Image: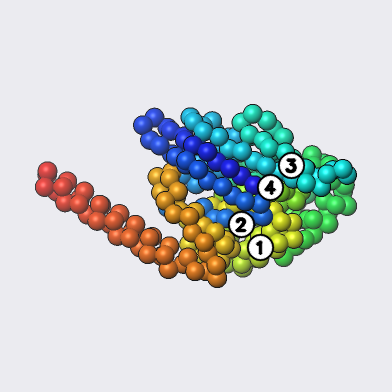
Amino acid sequence: MEINISNLKKKYGDKTAVDISDFNVPKGQIIGLLGNNGAGKTTLFRLMLDLTEANEGSVCMTFDTPTESSTDATLKIDPSESEEWKRYTGSYIDESFLIDFLTPEEYFGFIGRVCDMTKEQTQERIDSFEAFMGNEILGQKKFIRNFSAGNKQKIGIISAMLHHPQLLILDEPFNFLDPSSQSIIKQLLKKYNEEHKATVIISSHNLNHTVDVCPRIALLEHGVIIRDIQNENNSAEKELEAYFNVSVEENIETETNTEEETLTEE
């Protein structure tokens, strides 16, 4: 599947959260949205998933829908106008996506039924995440709401991938995870992309993890994609490090100037 974003804008009062004139994600690409907190990453995802209404512009998703008569058949969808995209999409933004009064087993089973998977298919796919779950998810006899933030994150990521979606969207997937789990999810995302030719979009403020996973990185600042970087063999790392170092220095300088102005006024 592929995504085309055109003249997409979202404002909250006088503040522009997203302003993207033209952006394309081709089929089978892993792309990272990188930026500081407040850059617009989550808002962009919420627009793509029709969780927030745009002020202007559109998101067009083109999914593969092969039939016996045509293996090249596709379906174009604007998420704001149709819910068909949900069949082909897996996403996890935050804990609100979870049904937290269920156990993980019940929740995964529910997703399997909604996606017309057999019990055997569901269990087989759950088993493929065994290393990622460790011994902390299944068989705990407790509701999702009683798990740690890291384990809730794992449950959310697994639930998004369980039905093998053509489009996978994960917001800050490395948050709350220990280093071993972060390493495993990076491997899982790469493997999933390779095996299923899925389009994978992740957001993060973590430079190293994003560079490790994504061969293409879009850098957001104040809702605008200011750089679209090809990242072959981690080639984007130095450019991104330079950007974030400059950002830190600018923030420190701004804070210092503000403090000096306040002292002067006093």
Question: For the C terminus, which image quadrant?
Answer: top left
Numbered tag placed on residue 190 in the rendering: 1
Question: Front-most of 58 and 152?
Answer: 58
User: In terms of sequence position, does the residue under pointer 1 or pointer 4 come before the other?
Assistant: 4
| Residue position marked by numbered label 2 in the rendering | 30
Q: Nearer the viewer, mark 3 or mark 1?
A: 3
What amino acid is labelled 3 in the image? Thr
Residue 114 picture quarter: top right
| Residue at the outermost bottom position | 233
Spatial separation of the CA atoms under disc 3 and disc 1: 24 Å
Q: Which residue is mark 4?
A: 1
Mark 3 and mark 4 lie on one chain; the one further toward the N terminus is 4
Query: Mark 4 or 2, which is nearer the eye?
Result: 4
Mark 2 residue element: strand
| Secondary element at tag 3 | strand
Q: Residues within 10 Å of mark 3 (few under 14, many from 20)?
A: some
Q: Mark 1 and mark 4: span between their CA atoms?
A: 17 Å
- What is the C-alpha distance between the residues marked 3 and 4? 9 Å
Q: Which mark is residue 145?
A: none
The residue to which callout 3 is attached is: 74
Q: Amino acid at mark 4?
A: Met
